Amino acid sequence: MPGPAEKATEQDRRDLLVTVARELAETEGWAGVTTRRLAERTEIDMGDIYRHFADLEALIAAVAVCAFADLAADLAEAHAETAGSPEGVWPAVATAYLDFAYTNPEVYDAMLALTPDLALGVDGVPAAPRAVFAELRAALTPLAEGRDPDTLAEVGWSLLHGVVMLTRGGRLRPEGQEDREALIAQRLLRWP
């Protein structure tokens, strides 16, 4: 009887590889994501894995793009849940961003540390990273007060990313975590 990978389409196999790589990375770190482990977990031949992804960097980039899409969806959902309260949009979006980053640390690293080609302003960046920026921009535009919304979104993203990385790196006081996040979400970039 054929295994699940044998019945799958090419796109299904690619999606399965991305999903399994993401799961392995979150449980064991990116060092645990090897072609052999992927082949065992997905029942996809190692040669076929290389047909989908030339190397580990290509697989990490695919995981990152998928994760950017997930983050954009989380941010859009947070925004939609506060539609009746414009002053609550940025705090909700900031919280959703931080929740995603802390819940998915290895995937977050793939998105923002391991894939420099996914930077805004680089030609050919997939839609998913741009969608995250668009959601941050939409949340911050009402707070712009004459300032450039793109620059404000870049600063907002930088603040969120910085607190995530410094917190994860153990560089900040643990007891100040809630205060830092409240300051970013509710006081620094607040409703006019």
Image (spheres, rainbow, N blue to C red):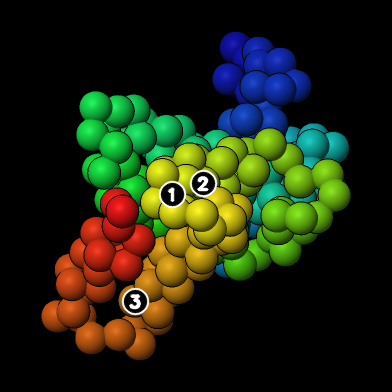
Q: Nearer the viewer, residue 6 or 148?
A: 148
Q: Position of residue 39 (x, y in %)?
A: 65, 42
Q: Nearer the viewer, residue 38 or 75?
A: 75
Tell which circle, 1 or 3, labels the residue nearer the N-terminal end: 1
**Label 3's element?**
helix
Q: Position of residue 79 (x, y in %)?
A: 35, 35
Point out the image quarter for the N terminus.
top right
Work out whether residue 5 can be spotted.
yes
Residue 140 got which mark? 1
Q: Quadrant of residue 190?
A: bottom left
Is the residue under label 2 in contact with that under label 1 (CB below 8 Å)? yes
Badge count: 3
From the viewer's perspective, is residue 111 above or below residue 10?
below
From the viewer's perspective, is residue 154 above or below residue 22?
below
**Label 1's element?**
helix
Q: 10 Å neighbourhood of mark 1: few (<14), some, or many (≥20)?
A: many
Tell which tag, 3 or 2, sits nearer the viewer. 2
From the viewer's perspective, is residue 115 above or below residue 71?
below
Q: Position of residue 22 (x, y in %)?
A: 52, 47
- Residue identifier under label 3: 167
Q: Is residue 74 left or right of residue 108?
A: left
Q: Residue at x 59, y 60 (%)?
A: 151
Residue 137 got which mark? 2
Tell which tag, 1 or 3, sits nearer the viewer. 1
Tell which circle, 3 or 2, labels the residue nearer the N-terminal end: 2
The amino acid type, in three-letter code, at marker 1 is Leu
Is the residue under label 2 in contact with that under label 3 (CB below 8 Å)? no
Q: Position of residue 185 (x, y in %)?
A: 29, 59
